[in-house]
Structures are given as structure tokens and as C-alpha cells.
Amino acid sequence: MNGIYGEYKPVLEEIKNDFQRRIEEYTEQEYQKSGIKIYEHLISRVKSEESMSEKCRRKNLPETPDSALMEMHDSIGLRIVCSFIEDIYTNIRYIKSFPDCRIVDEKDYIRHAKPNGYRSYHMILEVQYPYADLCGNNPGKYYVEIQLRTIAMDSWAALEHKLKYKKNVANQELIIAELKRCADEMASCDVSMQTIRDLITGTEE
Ligand code: 0O2
């Protein structure tokens, strides 16, 4: 067995591609109906085996396929980046209507931002796939993490992630406070942009 995913690596890639296709399909249908593109862009990835091994070590779990696929729930990740806040919740309604998916965890860091200012909506789905899982279920059960954000939330998260690499800098408290201030200002712009769209589309008096 090679990496931490063992024989499951190609399966994870297939599930990821399959799931992305499903999201693209409902988006296209929605676009044909309403002319609205309910997300701006979508990215997906299978977490690299190095990152997954490092995460297992950090959580004191053995570096095995069992830890990577059953204990961890983010080996497959999709990020849906939307133009407007409302579109995030439209996407969530679509995803929840998928018949063969069960939501096992949901975190609304939009309504309840993290203390550092991070905003995003996270869902962990249990999906079925016609390949036996480690417990012998066939169809197997696999996990997919979906993060939904606006463009502003995504920009903030990307910049904050870059800045995290710089360790041992002075003025830590000031930097944390400034990052939080930027996050709050960007969130305020998201709300304004939503209001402007509502005014244009006539959903706001
Ligand atoms: P990567 O490479 O993005 O996948 P856990 O997943 O167990 O570590 P928890 O609390 O269960 O932690 O997960 P949570 O809070 O739902 O967040 C998981 C993912 O959300 C992270 O994945 C990040 O992608 C993103 N995230 C959460 N908080 C922050 C934050 O403060 N800043 C930024 N930039 N991203 C955040 P990973 O595994 O860290 O990395």
C-alpha cells in the first residue's frame, strides 16, 4: 500500500468528479430557468496524502486509510464561491435535496463568524458510491466536505491563510484585530451588495 488513502485514491477522485458534475448540472438547469448563475466558481480537490497524513499526526490518529476516510471527513472537498449571500443558501437547498446524501454536520460560520472573522458555510455529507468502503458496505459510504462562501469571504480566507505562514512577527494582537476588522468590513459589503441586488430585482421595497 502506498499513500494514506491506499487503494481508495482513485475512488476519491471519482467521487469528487461525480459530485462536482452534479453541482454543475443543477446550476446549469437553474441558469436556463432564471438566467442567474448561482455560483461564481467552484473548485474541488482530494486532500493531498501528505496533508492528510500531517492532519492525522496532529490529531494523534494512526496514518491509515481508516483514519483518512472514516475519522476525517475532508478527504474530498468542494468549495462553492458565490457572488451573493443569498446564493449560498440557494446552493445549500439544492445540495440538501440530493436523494443519496445525508448531512452529518453543518456549520454556519456566516451567521456565526469565527472569532478571527472567518466566514463560510461548511457541510459534511455522507455520500453513497458503488465501491465497497472500509466497513464492507456496498455501495460504500464516503464523506465530502463542502465549503460555501461569497467572493469577499473567499478573498479574506485566502489572504488570512497566506499571512498565517509568517510566524514570530511582532504586533500579533494588532494584526489579529486588523484582520478581524477587514473581515467585518468585507461582510458589511456583502450585505450591501445583496441589498443592491434585491433593489434591482425588485425583491426589496
Ligand atoms: P484545508 O487545506 O483548507 O482543507 P478540522 O477540519 O478538524 O481541522 P474543524 O473545526 O472541524 O477542524 O473544521 P472547520 O472549522 O469546519 O474548518 C475546516 C476548514 O475550514 C479548514 O480546513 C479551512 O479550509 C477552513 N477554515 C476554518 N477556519 C479557518 C480560518 O480561520 N481561516 C481560513 N483561512 N480557513 C479556515 P483545513 O483542514 O485547515 O485545511
Image (cartoon, grey):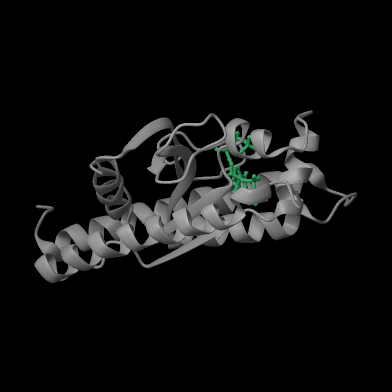
- The location of residue 62, given as percent across then percent down, is 78, 32
Foreground residue, 70 or 195? Answer: 70
- Picture quadrant of residue 106: top left
Foreground residue, 137 or 177? Answer: 137
- Picture quadrant of residue 21: bottom left
Residue at position x 79%, y 55% in the image: 165
* Res. 120 visible in picture: no
Q: Total marks drawn? A: 0
* Res. 75 visible in picture: yes
- The location of residue 152, given as percent across then percent down, is 47, 60
Foreground residue, 204 or 65? Answer: 65
Foreground residue, 26 or 200? Answer: 26
Residue at position x 61%, y 36% in the image: 72
Horizontal side of 20 relative to 28 (left or right) equals right
Judge whether 33 appears above or below 100 on screen: below
- The location of residue 160, given as percent across then percent down, is 66, 55
- The location of residue 171, given as percent across then percent down, is 83, 48
**Which quarter holds ligand 1?**
top right
- Picture quadrant of residue 70: top right
Residue at position x 9%, y 60% in the image: 202
Horizontal side of 117 relative to 88 (left or right) equals right
